[in-house]
Image (spheres, grey):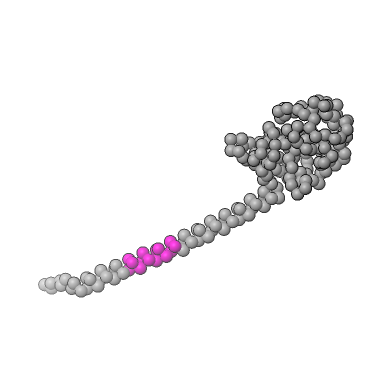
Amino acid sequence: MKRRTPESPETETESNGQSLSSLLVKEELKRERNKIRFRRIIKYTVNTMIVVAAIAVLITSLLLPVLQISGTSMEPTLRNGDIVVLVKTSNMDRGDLCGFSYSNKILIKRVIGLPGDIIFIESDGTVYVNGILADEPYLADKGLGECDIEFPYTVPENTFFLMGDHRTTSIDSRSTVIGCVPYEQIVGKLFFRVWPFEEIGVLS
């Protein structure tokens, strides 16, 4: 009967060495594959973020301009430092908050009169449009403010009669310095406040 001879220690050591070497190679290959996969994910993520940022900039510049309010002419509706979003449109209605270009700036006022409307403002600041008392719940107080036009005043065609909510300090269509604002100067309609955080919401 043949006796089975055990493998020599050298053979076992060599076999174990090959197995260990094979494991190390597999681990190294796995690490390299993970590195490649990780780099691809990072590259994809960065490219996606760049595209999203570009789209966001395009939207905000072309369709939804974002503005920071400067000054007090629209208090109490809007305060200095508020950040608001406009929708680009020249389709305005009475009472809308309107952004328009003036001397390389964008000013914010409220639409009081449309083309052809007849505006009358009493000495205490009470406003009538086409003989009807204007409903202005957004005002904290009334005032004639800086006014050098004669009433009744008819709003010219293709223009808007705009006024700030802080009537005593706002310089607007009551003054010939600003006057009525033509359609082509209208930037858009304010519709949303994004700052301060506690006042985020739709504007009216």
Which residue: 60% across, 38% down?
Answer: 196
Tally of numbered discs: 0
Residue 149: which quarter of the image?
Answer: top right
Question: Would residue 93 be visible to someone looking at this image?
Answer: no
Which residue: 66% across, 43% down?
Answer: 68
Q: Considering only vertical position in the picture, is 50 above or below 87?
A: below
Q: Quadrant of the N terminus?
A: bottom left
Q: Which residues are magenta?
A: 22-35
**As rendered, which of 59 and 5 lies closer to the eye?**
59
Residue 165 falls left or right of residue 14:
right
Residue 115 falls left or right of residue 53:
right
**As rendered, which of 58 and 98 lies closer to the eye?**
98
Residue 163 falls left or right of residue 12:
right
Answer whether residue 115 is magenta in the image. no
Q: Considering only vertical position in the picture, is 3 above or below 169?
A: below
Q: x%, y% of residue 27? A: 36, 64
Residue 190 falls left or right of residue 194:
right
**As rendered, which of 143 and 153 lies closer to the eye?**
143
Which residue: 69% across, 34% down?
Answer: 75
Q: x%, y% of residue 169? A: 74, 34
Q: x%, y% of residue 190? A: 70, 40
Residue 93: which quarter of the image?
Answer: top right
Q: Quadrant of the C terminus?
A: top right
Q: x%, y% of residue 139? A: 72, 29
